[in-house]
Image (cartoon, rainbow, N blue to C red):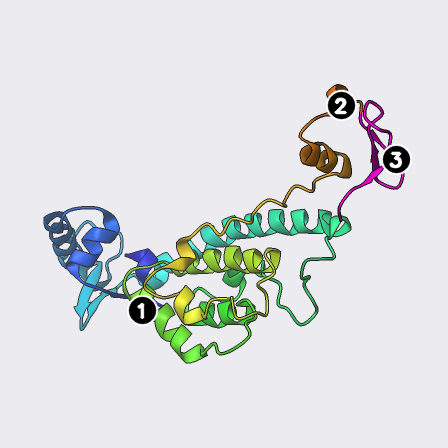
Amino acid sequence: MLAMTDKNGRVWGSIPGLANRAQVSVDDTETALNKFLSPDKYSRTTDHEGRRIEVIDGGWRLLNHAKYRAIRDEEERKEYKKDWIANKRAADKAVDNVDPSRPQYTNTDPDPYTDPLKTTTDSDDAFNLAWKIYPRRAGGNPKGKAQKAWDARIKSGADWHDLWDGLIRYREFCKATGKWRTEYVKQAATFFGPDKHYLEKWEIPDEPKTESLMDRVYRENGTGPQSSGMVLDEDGTVIRPEMDQRPRDIPH
């Protein structure tokens, strides 16, 4: 439930939804909730008689949310910072090997590896950060609809960290495949929508293999140099000494 809370410690959902998220039965979920709702004289937190949660309209509120959020934030910040530094170092090393045919980051494009946990642990703030780095798109991309789609995923039990990580993958995919600033970039409302495109891998395809001039000659003539005695002149002309020695231009 900690992973599903908003900034006020509220968890939106139903008992079946919690059971599905936790991969346990509905009965086990009800048993756990009843325990969290009941007083606990052995609890180390004496507030609320040791109760962990209370029922609210549309879900529950974690009574000790602020305490445990601070603990979780510190742990996640350390882990996320570690990954961010590794990604940043890898990006710095790749500067000298930039492919000029691919779109590059500019001073107006936010750094996609900006650590959102530096500034927020709240889903709403995280969305605003995500909106700033969403792939540029030709055509419409309504922010309001994107916000509603984001909120719907969070309310259904999604972790906004998954939405953020998926966006980073999709951003790199759009740049690498030439979709950046085109109508082929998905609207954010679709990307964060019920089809959950943010969970896809968005693997960048390998560069196509370029066929050499010699390989092209062999392929078009259905043979190799050993069996044909073929010679390739400097201007790309094929000479067959065993035939008539007349040059044949390679089609362009």
Between label 2 and label 3, give the one nearer the viewer: 2
Residue that label 2 marks: 228
Q: Is residue 248 magenta?
A: yes
Residue that label 3 marks: 233
The residue lying at 63 percent from left, 45 percent from top is 208
- The first of marks 1 and 2 along the sequence is 1
Categorize mark 1 by other alpha carbons within 10 Å: few (<14), some (14-19), many (20+): some
Q: Amino acid at mark 1?
A: Ala
Quarter residue 220 falls in: top right
Provide residue 95's location: percent of width, then percent of height. 74, 52
In what quadrant of the picture does the N terminus appear?
Answer: bottom left
- The first of marks 3 and 1 along the sequence is 1
The kind of secondary structure element at disc 1 is helix
Quarter residue 216 falls in: top right
In the image, taking residue 216 as reference, residue 58 lies left or right, namely: left
* Gap between marks 2 and 3 measured at Cα: 15 Å
- Residues rendered magenta in the picture: 230-252
Q: Amino acid at mark 3?
A: Asp
Between label 3 and label 1, give the one nearer the viewer: 3
Q: Nearer the viewer, residue 211 or 155?
A: 211
Q: Amino acid at mark 2?
A: Ser
* Gap between marks 1 and 2 measured at Cα: 67 Å
Q: Nearer the viewer, residue 22 or 95?
A: 95
Residue that label 1 marks: 152
- The first of marks 2 and 3 along the sequence is 2
